[in-house]
Image (cartoon, rainbow, N blue to C red):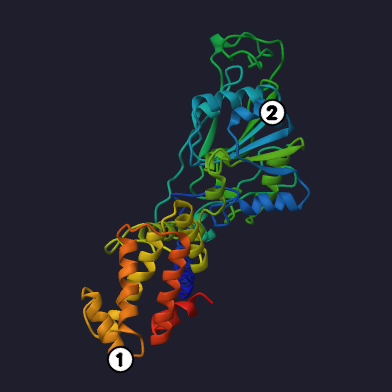
Amino acid sequence: MRQRLTIILTFVVIIGLLVILNTLTFVKKDKNEDLEINPNRSTYHSGPTGTRALHDFLNESGYKVMRWREPPEKLLSSSGRMVATFVVIGPVQVAFTEDEASALRQWVAQGGRFVLIDRWPDSQMLPKSNGWGVKWREFGFPNLDVNPADATQMTQTVSPVKPVQPTVLTRNVNSILPSRFASRLNVVAPDEENTEAPDKVRIVTPDVDEADEEAEDISRAPIVHMADYSGALLVDYSYGLGSIVVLSDPYIVANGGIRLNDNLQLALNTLSGPGGLIAFDEYHHGKGITQNAFAHYFAGTPVLAIAAQIVLLVLLILWTRGRRFARPLPSAGVDRRSSLEFVASMAELQERSRAFDLAIENIYTRTRRVLARHAGVDYNSSRSEIATRIAARSTIDRQKLETLMRQCEEAINGEPINWRQAIDLVRRLREVERDLGLRMRSRDVRQAAENI
C-alpha cells in the first residue's frame, strides 16, 4: 500500500508540474501580435483583426445573432429558414467549395440576404444578376510591419468616405474611415446584346441556373452607397428573390477599426437590414461543428497539451507496469485450509482406504527422526542402537522401545494390521515422546502459534 501511495503522489506532482509548465507557455504564446497580413476575422477572436466586438455589441443591443458553424448547404434546410442575413467576413481559413458557393447562391435566390465583407472576394461568391456584376480591384497590400491595433498606421493618408446618396444602408452615417488597404468595387453593366429590355432582368430561381431560365420579375442594378474618387466601398444588388451586399474593407467592422468615425453605424445598417436572425459564418473560419468540438472549444489554451501529456504519462505507467525488469518469480501459494482440516481429510481418506500402514508411516517417520536426534545418532542407525542410547539417557526400557519400533516398521512394510492395532501403536509412540519430553519442540510451538 505504501508503494502505491508513492506512485500516486508522484503522479499528482508530475501532473501539477505539467499544468504549471503549459500555463506559463500559454501566457508567452498569447503575447504574439495580430497581423493584418494574416488576419483572423472570426467572431471568436478578440484581437484587432477579429470581429468579436461587433458580434457582442449586436447581441447585447437586442439583435438576433448567431455563429453559423455548419456547411452552407444547411441554409437550404429547416434551420436555414430562420436565417435572414448570412454574413461572411474574409479572408476565411477554409475556402468555399463550388458546391458550397452554389448552395449559398440558391439560398439567396430564395429570398435570403448575403453580406460579404472582404478585400479580395471569391468571384463565385458574387454572381451576376441580369448581366449586372461587381468587380473589384486591389488598392493596397499590408506587410509585416503594419500593426492592426494602431489606427494611425491602418488609416495613414486615408480620407473619410461619405455616403453617395441617402439610403437605408447609409442612415445616420456622416462618414466612415476605412483602412489604407481597402479594395474598391466597380459596377459592371451587362452587354447590350444580352439585354432584352431596359426593365426586364434575368434572375436565378430556386431550382434553375441563372443562364438557363428567365423570369418576369423586375430586378434593379447594383446600387453604390459609399464611394470616393477611387471607387465604391459598399454596394448591394438583387439576386433572385434575395439580395447581396458587398463591403470591400473588413477593417470597418474589425475590432481595431469599428470605433472610428461612423464605422459602427454603417456595420449596424449593413447587417441588420430587414431584421431577423443574423448568422456569422464560422464554419469557414475553422469552427465547424463537424470537426472535433472538444478540440475547437479548448483551441488556443494549454488544456489540449496538458491532456495529451497526461495520456502519454498514463500509457507510460501502464507500459512499465506490464513489463518485467527481473527474473520471473512464482506467485506465493497460500494454503487456505487449516491444519485441522488437512488432518481430518487425510484421516478420512486413510480410513476409507484402510491404509493404516500409511498412517503409522507418517507418524513413525517423524518419531524415529526425533529419537535419532535425541540419541545423537544418524537417522539410518539401527533400531537397537537408537533404543540402547535412548535407554541410557532416560528411564525408558530398551527392550520395549526396540519392540515398538520393530512393530511399526513391520506394519509399514506390509504386515497385516487393523485399526485397533494401529491406534495402539500410535498411542505408544506418543507416550515415548511424552516421556522424553519431545512432543512440544520449538517448531511445534511455532506452528501452533501460527494456527491460532
Residue linked to disc 2: 112
The quarter holding residue 312 reads: bottom left
For this rendering, which residue is in front, 264 or 359? Answer: 359
Answer above or below: position of 420 versus 187. Answer: below
SS assignment at label 2: loop
Residue 270: % across, % down: 68, 40
Q: Is residue 185 left or right of residue 214?
A: left
Measured as percent of width and height from the top left, residue 314 is found at 44, 59
Left or right of residue 415: residue 146: right
Instruction: Tell me, yes or no, whether the two marked residues, 1 and 2, touch with CB atoms within 8 Å.
Output: no
Q: Earlier in the sequence, mark 1 or mark 2?
A: 2
Visible in this render: residue 178? no
Give the quarter of the figure containing the C terminus. Answer: bottom right
What is the x, y in percent for residue 114? 64, 32
Q: Amino acid at mark 2?
A: Gly
Q: Residue at x 68, y 26 (%)?
A: 77
- Looking at the picture, tell me which residue is in the foreground, 435 or 207: 435
Which sits in the foreground, 83 or 287?
A: 287
Dot 2, how many residues are within 10 Å of its Cα: few (below 14), some (14-19), or many (20+)? Answer: many
Q: Is 148 left or right of 108, judged from the image as shown?
A: left
Instruction: From this view, report whether residue 352 is shown above or below residue 205.
Output: below
Label 1 sits on what residue type? Arg
Instruction: Say which residue label 1 marks.
Output: 393
Above or below: residue 242 compared with residue 405: above
Residue 371 in the image: state x and y as whole percent: 31, 80
The residue carrying pointer 1 sits among few (fewer than 14), some (14 to 19) or many (20 or more) residues within 10 Å by Cα, namely few
Q: Nearer the viewer, residue 266 or 397?
A: 397
Q: How many marks?
A: 2
